[in-house]
Image (cartoon, grey):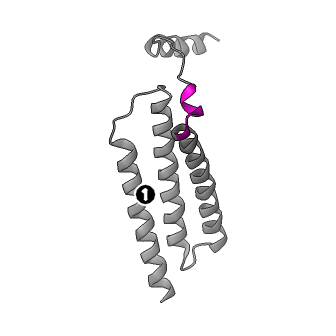
Amino acid sequence: MRRIFTIALPIVLLTASNAAAINIAVITTPPGALNVALCLCAIVCSVVGFKVFSVVKGGLLGRSWQLIGGAFAIFAATQLAGLLDSLEIFTAPDWLVPAGSVVMAAIFLFALFEAKKVLS
């Protein structure tokens, strides 16, 4: 018990900050609802991509499915970061979401070229 207090007390003291309510009204606006829908779809696509990768079991198309799952995971993370920024939970730079989308598109394009190389 004493060890728990010696670990927990500095963590509580160092992470203490002002408490504020989140801006929940953002979710009810059309852009907020679209961000939530995109985030959920990206999570589902990422899970499906990694499930297909596990079914392929490292075959010739395994690398492309792994890249597709990773691209959707990056897209889900950027959408989640944008949603948390609009809810005012944390402040993200303005370039974070577009940069994440560009990285996702580049990885997705690379995965398509890998699949084309295998299939041709």
Residue 51, x across and y down, in percent: 65, 63
- What is the three-letter code of the residue carrying label 1? Met
Residue 44, x across and y down, in percent: 63, 54
- The residue at the point 60 percent across, 61 percent down is 50
Quarter of the image for residue 91 reads top left
Foreground of the two, 10 or 6: 10
Relative to 47, is 15 on the left or the right? left
Disc 1 target residue: 104
Foreground of the two, 78 or 47: 78
- The residue at the point 44 percent across, 83 percent down is 117
Image vertical order of residue 119 relative to residue 68, above or below:
below
Residue 99, x across and y down, in percent: 35, 49
- Residue range in magenta is 24-30
Q: Mostly what secondary structure, the magenta segment?
A: helix
Residue 29 among those drawn in magenta: yes
Image vertical order of residue 51 relative to residue 12, above or below:
below
